[in-house]
Amino acid sequence: MEFKGQTALITGSARGIGKAIAEALARRGADVAIADRDLDEAKEAAKEIAAIGTRTAAVRLDVSNSGEVIKTFQDILKEFGRLDILVNNAGITKDGLLMRMKEEEWDAVINVNLKGTFLCAKEAVKIMAKQRYGRIVNIASVVAFIGNPGQANYSASKAGIVGLTKTIAKEYASRGITSNAVAPGFITTAMTDVLSENVKEEMKKAIPLSRFGTIDDVANAVVFLASNGYITGQVLHVNGGMYM
Ligand code: NAP
């Protein structure tokens, strides 16, 4: 129960990787706040996770909306009294080749993935700096390192997250806050279910471990970073070897 007495906020955690992270943290004793755009789905997830035996809360949050982010962090602090772990997991894709990518598609992905991570980290460090303790884990992606045709917006947003992660690590190390990123490869979730079988088979060929990752593969990496006080500014790759 290494996180007993700690509070974690996970964005985009009503389903997929975020929900698995919330569950994994709760299993190790953390109280968890499930923040997602869809409040009903967030409530469902919070109810399920509460059965593990820790305190949970469901919050409606669009991470790209600064007003909502500020209010959410105030509410969580009021409800739980502290914030120890922030996992910036909320993310979207709007794929298309660069020539055809609309400005709105670029803006939407940057706003959720990169600006959302900035807004949430900004509110978190205010609380964590006072506590002199905090663990920030940002979810990046392998495409930040290798690029991906059709994902100019997404890969740029995830590469931006890597730079942001390292800067937070340097700015707040003296306050006991670590900041790291997990960069998943191809993980089976709703985000990747939309890809055609052909594309999936092609992708598998590029993975030395010959399988797609699971949501628990990613959640375990987040747990590791959240529990370690001497790793900061790092990217942990969880990709079956597709990028080394
Ligand atoms: P997912 O199944 O689509 O889940 C993402 C969750 O984030 C959804 O519940 C979604 O809510 C929520 N969300 C979207 N925009 C939001 C916003 N503005 N504010 C708050 N919540 C928002 O995706 P996933 O596969 O679990 O991905 C989770 C993270 O891992 C993302 O950052 C993604 O980029 C990253 N990642 C995934 C893979 C992969 O292979 N799956 C690989 C590398 C990185 P809605 O239902 O309202 O959309």
Image: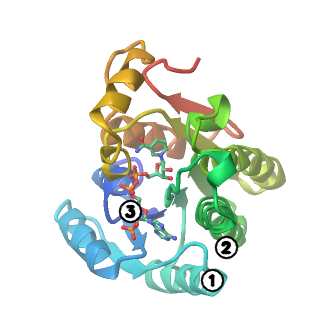
Q: Residue type at mark 2: give it.
A: Glu
Whether disc 3's CB lies below 8 Å from ligand 1 is answered: yes
Evaluate if marks 1 and 2 touch, with contact meaning CB atoms under 8 Å apart.
yes
Q: Residues within 10 Å of mark 3 (few under 14, many from 20)?
A: many
Percent across and percent down for residue 193 are 30, 45
**Residue position for label 2:** 123
Q: Quadrant of residue 58?
A: bottom left
Residue 29 numbered mark, or none: none
Evaluate if marks 1 and 3 touch, with contact meaning CB atoms under 8 Å apart.
no
Percent across and percent down for residue 151 are 59, 45
Whether disc 2's CB lies below 8 Å from ligand 1 is answered: no
Percent across and percent down for residue 154 are 60, 50
**Residue position for label 3:** 13
Q: Ligand 1 sits in which quadrant?
A: bottom left
Q: Residue type at mark 1: give it.
A: Ile
Percent across and percent down for residue 147 are 64, 33
Frontmost residue, 56 versus 166: 166
Q: Is residue 155 above or below residue 239?
A: below
| Disc nearest the viewer among 2 and 3 | 3
Frontmost residue, 79 versus 147: 147
- The colour mode here is rainbow
The reply to whether residue 205 is visible in this rendering is yes
Q: CA distance from mark 1 to mark 2?
A: 6 Å
Frontmost residue, 232 versus 163: 163
Quarter of the image that includes the C terminus: top right
Of labels 1 and 3, earlier in sequence is: 3
Element type where label 1 sits in the image: helix
Residue 70 numbered mark, or none: 1
Element type where label 3 sits in the image: loop
Q: Residues within 10 Å of mark 2 (few under 14, many from 20)?
A: some
Q: CA distance from mark 2 to mark 3?
A: 18 Å
Q: Is residue 48 left or right of residue 63?
A: left
